[in-house]
Image: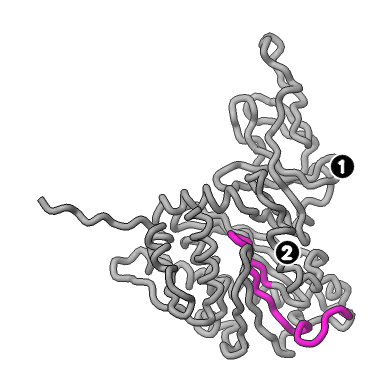
Amino acid sequence: MKDEIATPSPLAELRDALAGPFAEARAMPKSVYTSPEFLALEQERLFARDWVSAGRASRLKVPGDYLTLEVADEPVIVLRDRDGALRAMSNVCRHRMSVLLEGEGNTRTITCPYHAWTYNLDGTLRGAPGMGLNEAFCRGDIALPQIACEEWKGWIMLCLDPAAPPPSERLGALDALIGHYRMEDYVELFQERFRWATNWKVLGENFMESYHLPACHAGTIGGTVSLEEMTCPPGEEGFNYHWILKNESAKLALAHEANTWLEGEDRRKTWLISLYPSLFITLTPGYFWYLSLTPVSPGEVDVLYGGGLAPEFLGEAEAEENFHALKTLLDEVNREDKGCTEAVYRGLTSRLGKPGPLSHLERPNWDFAQYILSRLDA
């Protein structure tokens, strides 16, 4: 009986695909997108160990404001506590482990819908009806586990790993690139959620490269960009980036006349920033928009989509009209991206599909693949 040839694991395939230099780079192997086992490894070694974002901190304005999400399949509450500080904690009751809160809103206390155990906004147990006869019960010993949570440049950042270095350390090199844009002051004006039928990395890679703009976005922005004017430098350990120079036709993409701190090309430069693993930000002198991704399955991703304006534009009489036009355009661009990224995933599940060579304009994708390998191969 002939020995069967063992099929290499997705991690081994990725390791082999990245063995050469960028000048010979190819797209990641199909298995890293379609394998449930690979996604489980990503959840364990990417999403459970690196910083992820719950969106803009301005969503939580006053004490008691909260939102919920899952990080590496872990239910999490993020809220403003009574002192106005951002706090994140487990969203699982310490009694019979029901999920506590759903969605977002404002609350004075956190009350379990199952047996009405109630927690303060700092996670300490406030009350537990019917527990007086249990001699081992001690209210002071029970609290919701805390999760690392920081505000970084206006973003809520979370990490399940208490030993992870803070975002400011991991992303320090980004401050030198875009710190002078004052992203923390930008005002979020919309925030939506949706689910697409593609792998989270396909959508992330789509954001990272502008090579697809002329074709995928032929109906919207494809004709306004030049492949020859795109710059894609090597990325850093915690992020990659590239930029595009916009012309005078896009008013909100240019610095406002009241903006006196941006100079030269910075006044018309659009940055596309990918914070590993799953926060993707477009930052211009006048507006920003972003995607924060949560994988659901190999072929499904939940997307938090939001954006807004630099504060200098908010006082203008035509600000609302201009932003409405921008939002309409962004929504249409997103619809185009949905069609393109879902088509890629369908191709990834084909028998005959095979990854091809990368363009120099896809340097961020190669850096992203190197990041994934470095975390999963550790």
In the rendered image, the vertical position of residue 222 relative to residue 367, given as above or below: below
Q: Nearer the viewer, residue 270 or 48?
A: 48
In magenta, the rendered stretch is: 259-282
Residue 297 horizontal side relative to residue 305, left or right: left
Rendered image: mark on residue 83: 1
Rendered image: mark on residue 335: none
- What's the amino acid at mark 1? Asp
Q: Residue furthest left?
A: 1
Residue 266 horizontal side relative to residue 49, left or right: right
What residue is at 22 percent from the left and 56 percent from the top? 5
- Distance (Cα) linking label 1 and label 2: 28 Å
**Residue 344 in sight from this viewpoint:** no
In the rendered image, the vertical position of residue 128 relative to residue 50, given as above or below: above
How far from the left and from the top, in percent, is residue 51? 65, 54
What residue is at 52 percent from the left and 47 percent from the top? 44
The residue singled out by tag 2 in the image is: 172
In the rendered image, the vertical position of residue 117 relative to residue 92, given as above or below: above
| Quarter assignment of residue 113 | top right
- What's the amino acid at mark 2? Gly
